[in-house]
Structure formats: structure tokens, C-alpha cells
Image (tube, rainbow, N blue to C red):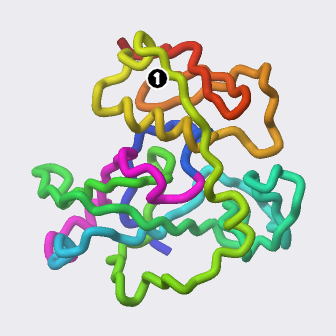
Amino acid sequence: MKIIAHIETDFTEKFGIPRQSGLIRELKGRIVFEPEYRNPEAFRGLDGFSHIWLLWKFSESRKENWSATVKPPRLGGKKRMGVFATRSPYRPNDIGLSCVGLERIVQEEELGPVLYVAGIDLLNGTPIYDVKPYIPYADCRPEATEGFVSQTKDHELNVHFPEELLFRFPENKRKAIIEVLKQDPRPGYDVDENRVYGISFAGYNVKFQVEDHMVEVCDVTGES
């Protein structure tokens, strides 16, 4: 397996990254290819697709032995499911799969073709194994069932983000951080209402607490 590229995103830590791709369109990234894969011919026709599949490496999930069952966070971190019934990073092979929006392809002088994408769920620097076009007639299955995920997919919090704190972010990052908090980044087994959590995002650290389905942002530190 050859690493063909790396993605640049606003997430420098795993905490806070959406559990699935496509949930937050405002989360942007760009894919920079390794020198040997920068031939523009390799990208011919890709600009005709609105979405692409990314196959990537769980580079931060180091585990020598795999387990047949895992504890999905959205199920409270106590109920076990088979690893092949989940998208847990702790797998026999550390391969991830994401469907992201392809916003544009830019031919940059030093980097060659760079893909600008939206709806990401990847850590900054994540290695990319492959890029494939998303093809609606083949990839979309409206009749598909969703197993135990149907119990948890609508979990969303309200967010109170004081303006004086929100305005510390660049304008183009504000909607994204609010949407990240709405998704409730806490592990399902960690629901301590007295705890102050912190997310590293876009060069800032966001401190927050959660009480009665409400996220209360209490501080933002970092770049000014």
C-alpha cells in the first residue's frame, strides 16, 4: 500500500473530529499529493464529480492486536458490537473510508494538483491511500438499512457560544466550530456535567461544558 497524499485540516487532535464524513459541510481540507503522484493526467475528468471517496490510514490508532468486538461511543461505550459492524479505527487493517465533497482542483506551481474538499472527518496530516469518484447510481442505496446506527444518528446538542468568544475565530471558521460542538464530541461514556472539555481547532483551544443537552462555551484561547 503506497501513501499517495496527505490531507491538511483544522484538527490537530482526534477529540472533536466528526464520527462520520459529510456531517459538517463547513469542515474543509486540502489534499496534497506526493511528488510522484502529481501528474495532472492522473486527475483528468475528476473535476466532473461533486464528491469523492478517500481511502486513508488510521495513523494515530496504534494497537498491536485487533479485537473481534468494540464499544461504539454513541452506544455509551458499554455495549459491544462486532468490529465489522462498526467503523471503529481499531481494526485488523488500519484503513479508513470517507466520502467528501470535491470543491475544486487547483494546479499549484510547487505542489501540482491540490484537491480542496469539504465535509471532512480526518486529522491533519492523515495519509491518503487512494482517491476514487463517488458515483451516485452505483454508490447510493436509498433502500439500505442502518442497523444500530438508527438509534444514535439524530443525537445533537444546542450550543451557546458567546459572541465575544466566537469572534476570536476567523469568520470563515465560526459556523464550522459551532457545528462540531453540536455533534457532541464527548465519548458516550463520559457525561460528567461538571467537567470542562477542550477542543483544538484551527489553531484555537475551545473550552466548554455540557448540561441538559446544552453546550456552554466558556473560553477560547490561541491565535489572536
Q: Nearer the viewer, residue 136 or 43?
A: 136
* Residue that mark 1 sits on: 204
Which stretch did the figure color magenta? 19-42
Tally the marks: 1
Give x and y (percent) for residue 194.
Answer: 79, 19
Q: Nearer the viewer, residue 181 or 9?
A: 181
User: Is residue 22 in the magenta section?
Assistant: yes
The residue positioned 60% from the left and 45% from the top of the image is 156
**Crowdedness near tag 1: few (<14), some (14–19) or many (≥20) residues, C-alpha within 10 Å:** some
User: Is residue 160 in the magenta section?
Assistant: no
**Residue type at numbered disc 1:** Tyr
The residue positioned 44% from the left and 82% from the top of the image is 140
Give x and y (percent) for residue 114.
Answer: 23, 57
User: Quadrant location of the C terminus?
Assistant: top left
Question: Relative to residue 47, is residue 153 drawn left or right?
Answer: right
Give x and y (percent) for residue 63.
Answer: 76, 57
The residue positioned 70% from the left and 20% from the top of the image is 196
Q: Quadrant of residue 174?
A: top left
Q: Quadrant of residue 36?
A: bottom left
